[in-house]
Amino acid sequence: MPKLLLTGAAGRLGRHLRQRFAEDGREVLATDIVQPEGAAPVEIADLADRAALERLMGQGVDAVVHMGGIATEAPWADILSANIEGTYNLFEAARRTGVRRIIYASSYHVVGMYPVAEVPLGIDAPVRPDTLYAVGKLFGENLARLYHDKFGIECLVMRICAASQPGSARELHLWCHLDDLTGLVRAGLDAPTVGYRRVYALSRCPEPWYVNDPAEALGWVPTHDVSELTPPDGVSWPPADPINTLQGAAFTRWPHFDD
């Protein structure tokens, strides 16, 4: 198995993936800007420090699972530093050290400004980002396309949906069980070739908001279904509520964080 660099290893999804990688017997070099609580230590490195990323990747790393960065809306300077410059530094460090495969965590918020009525969406639907955060994720998707076409670095772009216990009926259309997210990452790491491809990370649902082209999914098939869930008591989803008329919900209504 290849040696992995896992960024964002102190975050919720990063900690989960690190545990699953250990169960798989994968060799993982875990990094973040802070130490995780209640988990094994990580190598401290800032995505803004390209030299630090090159030092990490120079330790025999074969592939990167990039979960690092800001995971919600933030002021422009923070998005620019962590999610745009940081992602550039990661891809450039990979190019300079010979790393040939990256699994990149994007988000369904890159299409968050679509009305809920316009579902389901395929992976090739024109993008409609709902936040600066989503713009930063699109930068990473486009950078991955460039670095594949020009420099031969393979990249699986995962547009991660609601990877937590649903808190509303709306999220039942977006739910991604952590086992299914792990399975998609494994598929991206273990496939003989990946090229450049984008896949929505979500579990099975009778009325999904997003659909994948099976030919792009590297043989990955989600194993969990929303029928497993019991929605919380009192949770409803009134379509007339303005916050729910667009797919990105609250993200679409936040003001500019620099105001």
Image (cartoon, helix red, strand yellow):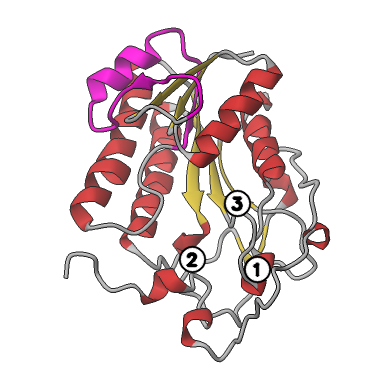
Q: Mark 1: few, some, or many residues within 10 Å (few <14, many ≥20)?
A: many
- Where 177 falls versus 124 (above or below)? above
Task: State the residue at coordinates (34%, 38%).
Answer: 87
Mark 1, residue position: 209
- Looking at the rendered image, the quarter that the N terminus falls into is top right
Reading the chain from its start, which is encountered first: label 2 or label 1?
A: 2
Q: Mark 3: few, some, or many residues within 10 Å (few <14, many ≥20)?
A: many
The label on residue 29 is: none
- Looking at the image, residue 42 sits to the left or right of residue 23; the answer is left
Rendering coords of residue 223 (x, y %): 80, 46
Q: Secondary structure at mark 1?
A: loop
Residue 49 falls in image quadrant: top left
Mark 2, residue position: 111
- Residue at the far bottom in the pictured view: 240
Task: State the residue at coordinates (47%, 81%).
Answer: 243
Task: Tell me the CA gap for discs 1 and 3.
Answer: 15 Å
Is residue 77 within the magenta segment?
no
Q: CB under 8 Å between callouts 3 and 2?
A: no
Q: Secondary structure at mark 3?
A: loop
Name the amino acid, label 1.
Answer: Trp
- Looking at the rendered image, the quarter that the C terminus falls into is bottom left
Q: Which residues are magenta?
A: 38-67
Mark 3, residue position: 163
Task: State the residue at coordinates (36%, 15%).
Answer: 56
Rendering coords of residue 200 (x, y %): 61, 53
- Looking at the image, residue 122 sits to the left or right of residue 95; the answer is right
Task: Tell me the CA gap for discs 3 and 2.
Answer: 17 Å
Reading the chain from its start, which is encountered first: label 3 or label 2?
A: 2
- Looking at the image, residue 130 sits to the left or right of residue 236; the answer is left
Name the amino acid, label 3.
Answer: Ala
- Looking at the image, residue 244 sits to the left or right of residue 149; the answer is right
Is residue 62 within the magenta segment?
yes
